[in-house]
Image: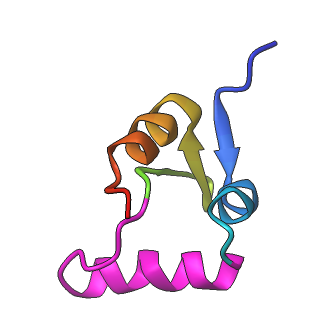
Protein backbone atom coordinates (compact mmCIF):
# COMPACT_ATOMS: atom_id res chain seq x y z
CA UNK A 1 0.00 0.00 0.00
CA UNK A 2 1.35 3.41 -0.98
CA UNK A 3 1.95 5.90 1.81
CA UNK A 4 -0.48 8.86 1.67
CA UNK A 5 0.66 10.98 4.64
CA UNK A 6 3.84 11.72 6.53
CA UNK A 7 3.72 12.29 10.27
CA UNK A 8 5.32 15.38 11.79
CA UNK A 9 8.23 13.30 13.03
CA UNK A 10 8.96 12.05 9.51
CA UNK A 11 8.84 15.56 8.04
CA UNK A 12 11.28 16.79 10.68
CA UNK A 13 13.70 14.02 9.71
CA UNK A 14 13.31 14.74 5.99
CA UNK A 15 13.98 18.45 6.57
CA UNK A 16 16.88 17.75 8.98
CA UNK A 17 15.29 19.77 11.78
CA UNK A 18 13.96 18.84 15.18
CA UNK A 19 10.26 18.22 15.83
CA UNK A 20 10.28 21.20 18.18
CA UNK A 21 11.67 23.50 15.49
CA UNK A 22 8.94 22.39 13.09
CA UNK A 23 6.28 22.97 15.79
CA UNK A 24 7.78 26.41 16.47
CA UNK A 25 7.66 27.36 12.79
CA UNK A 26 4.04 26.22 12.47
CA UNK A 27 2.98 28.13 15.59
CA UNK A 28 4.93 31.23 14.60
CA UNK A 29 3.25 31.24 11.18
CA UNK A 30 -0.18 31.01 12.85
CA UNK A 31 0.52 33.93 15.17
CA UNK A 32 2.31 36.23 12.73
CA UNK A 33 2.87 36.61 9.05
CA UNK A 34 3.94 33.43 7.31
CA UNK A 35 7.64 34.01 7.80
CA UNK A 36 8.83 30.40 7.80
CA UNK A 37 8.37 28.11 4.81
CA UNK A 38 6.61 24.97 5.97
CA UNK A 39 4.93 22.25 3.94
CA UNK A 40 1.12 22.17 3.78
CA UNK A 41 -0.51 20.05 6.47
CA UNK A 42 -3.85 19.02 7.89
CA UNK A 43 -4.82 18.35 11.49
CA UNK A 44 -6.79 15.19 12.22
CA UNK A 45 -7.65 14.33 15.83
CA UNK A 46 -4.90 16.65 17.03
CA UNK A 47 -2.19 15.12 14.83
CA UNK A 48 -0.45 17.01 12.06
CA UNK A 49 -0.33 15.08 8.81
CA UNK A 50 1.46 16.04 5.63
CA UNK A 51 0.33 14.72 2.25
CA UNK A 52 3.21 12.95 0.53
CA UNK A 53 2.28 14.46 -2.85
CA UNK A 54 1.88 17.98 -1.45
CA UNK A 55 5.14 17.70 0.49
CA UNK A 56 7.03 16.60 -2.62
CA UNK A 57 5.52 19.49 -4.64
CA UNK A 58 6.31 21.97 -1.85
CA UNK A 59 9.88 20.73 -1.54
CA UNK A 60 10.46 21.03 -5.30
CA UNK A 61 9.11 24.60 -5.25
CA UNK A 62 11.59 25.79 -2.60
CA UNK A 63 14.46 28.02 -3.79
CA UNK A 64 17.84 26.35 -4.15
CA UNK A 65 20.96 28.13 -2.89
Observer-nearest of 60 and 51: 60
* Residue 51: quadrant of the picture: top right
Give the left or right position of residue 36, taking residue 23 as reference.
Answer: left
Please identify the residue farthest to the right as the structure is shown: 1
Residue 33 counted in the magenta span: yes
Residue 56 place in picture, x, y as percent:
50, 36
Residue 59, above or below 22: above
Q: Seen in the image, is 61 located left or right of residue 44?
A: left
| Residue at the spot 74% in from the left edge and 62% down from the top edge | 13
Q: Looking at the figure, which quarter contains the N terminus?
A: top right
**Residue bounds of the magenta highlight:** 18-38
The C terminus: image quadrant: bottom left
Q: Residue at left 74%, top 55%?
A: 10
- 41, 58: nearer the viewer: 58
Figure quadrant of residue 14:
bottom right
Query: How many numbered discs sit on the rendered protein?
Result: 0
Q: Residue furthest top?
A: 1
Q: Nearer the viewer, residue 45 or 22?
A: 22
Applied colour scheme: rainbow
Classified by dominant secondary structure, the portion drawn in magenta counts as helix
Outermost left residue: 33
Q: Position of residue 40 (x, y in %)?
A: 40, 50
Q: Nearer the viewer, residue 18 or 42?
A: 18
The image quarter containing residue 12 is: bottom right
Q: Is residue 49 above or below residue 30?
A: above
Question: 41 above or below 34?
Answer: above
- Relative to 28, is 25 on the left or the right? right
Question: Is 64 located above or below residue 56 in the figure?
Answer: below
Q: Where in the figure is residue 52, as x and y percent of width and height?
A: 58, 34
State the residue at coordinates (37%, 57%).
64
- Whether the magenta-drawn stretch holds residue 21 is answered as yes
Residue 61 in the image: state x and y as whole percent: 32, 44
Amino acid sequence: MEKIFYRLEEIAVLLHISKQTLYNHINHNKLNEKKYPIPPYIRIHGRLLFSVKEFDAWLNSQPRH
